[in-house]
Image (tube, grey):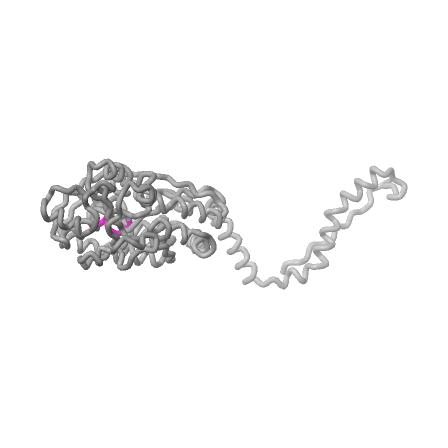
Amino acid sequence: MRHPPRPCEKKPAAGAQDANSRPAEAQHLTTLQSVPCLCQHLLQEHWEDMMKLTRRTLIHGAGGTALGVLAAPGLLRAQSGAIRLVVGFPAGGGVDAIARPVAARWQERLGQPIVIDNRPGNNGNIAMDYVAKGIADGTQLFQGNVGNLAMTHALFPNLPFDCNRDFRGVGQLTLGPLVFAVATESPIRTMTDLLAAAKARPGALNFGSGGSGGVPHLAFEVWKRAAGVDIVHVPYRGSAPALQDLMGGRIQLMVDGYSLMRGVHEGGRLRVIGITSADRHPQLPDVPTVKESGLDWIFTSWQAIVCPTATPAAVRQRLEDNLARTFRESDLPATLTGLGTFPRFAPGAEVDRLMREDRALWTSVVREAGISAD
């Protein structure tokens, strides 16, 4: 049985003086020396109360403390350091155009800076591999679209990462259609004109995209087969240079997100002739859907943010919760609408589901249509 500590008992030293007869400095020193003794008296006085702590309480307390100590370094980094939001396309592309307003508003809720890190190449696969093998503490994230997070495995079966194994969703950002666009000087003014020109001169028209195997490329290949036309695909290293060649007349057509084209469209340098959503977009009320033009074909992409699978659940949840707050409490939805997309926040679990189901869907589509990344 454990006993309370004994109060300190100090015997006066031989020849010791009475306290009142000592100099002030000596009295002060005696007071300081008596502090440990006072603490022991207090400890004895409250010993019984302290012993009421049960063994179970102590065990739980110790366990919680240990867990807190182990988790603290990663949590502190995740809540204080700058977040690197990696984008697999050049600045100015469709994903980058969404990432920048998202980061600007999300960082205000998180209370820590978010830096956009553009790592283009191989349809975003270089960036995805970088994040998959990188730090898993919430400070390194990836933003991509359905092409990165689902379609890519249908076209590149031997990738060094696996979306469903190596990533977990943080949140969905958009559900976005693509738009068909031509240069302002083009004789093609409608989707009907496009179909007529393509059928009159098979293989004469060129379609530019931001790279082989990307969302615009795959979506256009499916549309092309549904329409029964032959239009040659010209891949670029990013959508921005393709857009420059469209305005310069070196290619005749682009299909991409409106966020990429908004500035030049509003500046009168290109014409949007169709949109792939089921309904017209409020930002483009005069642009008919592809379905309205006579071809029963609808396509919508999506963008989302993911983190490495090993990221602690508490860190991932904090990111998700603050992203949801950003959609509720800021002007982000209005900003994304202005970019020609449909803002749509969904939690990480929904992103995980989309990655699984759309991967299976597009693997089937690519196989049946004979589409390749070339």
Vertical placement of residue 128 versus 41, above or below = above
Viewer-nearest residue: 18 or 263: 263
Q: Quadrant of residue 320?
A: bottom left
Residue at x-position 31% and y-position 52%: 284
- State the image coordinates of residue 349 (x, y, percent, origin top left): 35, 58
Magenta-drawn stretch contains 101: no
- State the image coordinates of residue 185 (x, y, percent, origin top left): 23, 40
Residue at x-position 27% and y-position 53%: 287
Residue 174 seen in the figure: yes
Residues shaded magenta = 149-154
Viewer-nearest residue: 54 or 153: 153
- State the image coordinates of residue 187 (x, y, percent, origin top left): 19, 44
Residue at x-position 41% and y-position 53%: 334
Residue 314 seen in the figure: no
Viewer-nearest residue: 109 or 80: 109
Q: Which residue sits furthest right?
A: 21
